Structure formats: C-alpha cells, structure tokens
Image: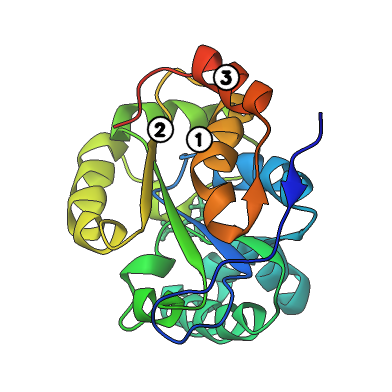
Amino acid sequence: MMPMLSAAPESPRNRAPIRRLVLIGFMGAGKSAVGPWVARALGWKFVDLDDEIARREGVPVPEVIRRRGIAHFRRVESKIGKQVLKRPYRVLSVGGGWAAQPGHMALLDGVALSVWLQVRPATALARIRASTLTRPLLEVKDPLPTARALLRERTPHYEGSRIRIGTEGKSPETVAREVIERAGPKVGLSLPESVAHDNKKGCEGST
Ligand code: S3P
C-alpha cells in the first residue's frame, strides 16, 4: 500500500506547514542516494545541491573547487542553497560542508525538517572510493585523519538536526525507509502499518 499524504502539520515556530526535508551529513553518508527514494515516497521533488551548483557553474563540483577554489564554492553553495530552500515540496541533499557554514542550520528553523545521516570516517572513505565523484577536500596522502578531523569539527553543527539516522551496514534503500518512517509523519505523511513493520525488519539500530 502506498503511504498517504495528509494535511501537513504546523511547525511550532511560525505555524507554517513543513514542506521541505533536508538531508545533512558527512561526505559518503549516502544523502544523494537516499534522497530520491524519500522524495518519491512523499510525492515531492528531489534536489541535490551539488548537482544544482554543477549545473549553474557548468562543471562538476570537484572541478568548481579545483579551478575556482573552496571559498568560491562555499559562496555559490550558500547562495544556491538559499534559493533552493525557498521552493516548497522538496527533499534537498546538501554537501557535507553546508551545515557547518555560519547561519546555515538556522535557515532550516520552522522551514525544513533536518535529517542527519550518520557515517563513520572509515566507512565514508570506503564509500567515496567506490563512487565516481571525487572529493577534493579528502585528496590528501592519508585521508583518514583528515576525514576524522573534519567530522569532529562539523559534528556540533550536524547535531542541530531534528532526526539522526545511522547508516552503517545499511543500503540506501534501507536508510530511505527509515527516513520515511521517522520523518514522514512530521511532514504530513501517514504510513500504513505494513510500511512501518517492514521498515523495522529491514533496519539495523539507528545511532
Ligand atoms: C564537501 C562535500 C561534497 C561536496 C564538496 C565539499 C564537504 O558533497 O559538496 O566536495 O565540504 O564536505 P557530499 O557531502 O555529497 O560528498
């Protein structure tokens, strides 16, 4: 049975319905893989902020960073992120550095439901190695200490998320089911019993 959308609940802050869901987390957490599943379940559109940046800059994000520098990338990321957040009925996945930029997490207050997909540095690196997209910030001789330091520095920002979901040992589809189960009701999705039940069976414990 398909999950049903009911009237969106009101957020406590401004009493406007929450019509955006933002997937946050470190590189390799699976945000871009999980997002389309969640968007499909909600009947919303999926936007990957890095893809949007690449489209507007005319080159993939690693090239934007290499050719124009990280400061330029952060400016563009911030500007386009704010534009995308104005559009309702969107599941947005943001790059791992977005949440750690000043004022970004506060942009979500009362506007979007934030979901932090958690990953350990070693797992993140293994997933990144298996993917086609490079991450310039981790292109160093020994990336593990760099990944650990970056994650440590960003964790206080990620902790501002409303929902946390562990992704270790889970497929993107399994993580997506967990996101839909936990976040769906907060954005007006009513889940039939069977979905919630299947979901519990298919997941390892969240962290
Ligand atoms: C970055 C994460 C990347 C991308 C860029 C910078 C970061 O996105 O935005 O390489 O600073 O953590 P993913 O988190 O999707 O890998």
Residue 43 drawn at (x, y percent): 80, 54
Q: Residues within 10 Å of mark 1 (few under 14, many from 20)?
A: some
Q: CB at mark 1 closer than 8 A to ligand 1?
A: yes
What amino acid is found at the position of numbered circle 1 in the picture? Ile
The label on residue 156 is none
**Does residue 99 appear to the left or right of 23 in the view shown?**
left
Q: Nearer the viewer, residue 133 or 81?
A: 81
Q: CB at mark 2 closer than 8 A to ligand 1?
A: no
Give the residue drawn at x 30%, y 35%: 121
Report the residue marked by disc 3: 197
Report the residue marked by disc 2: 125
Residue 179 drawn at (x, y percent): 53, 41
Report the residue marked by disc 1: 128
Q: Nearer the viewer, mark 3 or mark 2?
A: 3
Q: Is label 3 in contact with label 2 (beta carbons under 8 Å)?
A: no
SS at mark 3 in the image: helix
Give the residue drawn at x 81%, y 28%: 1
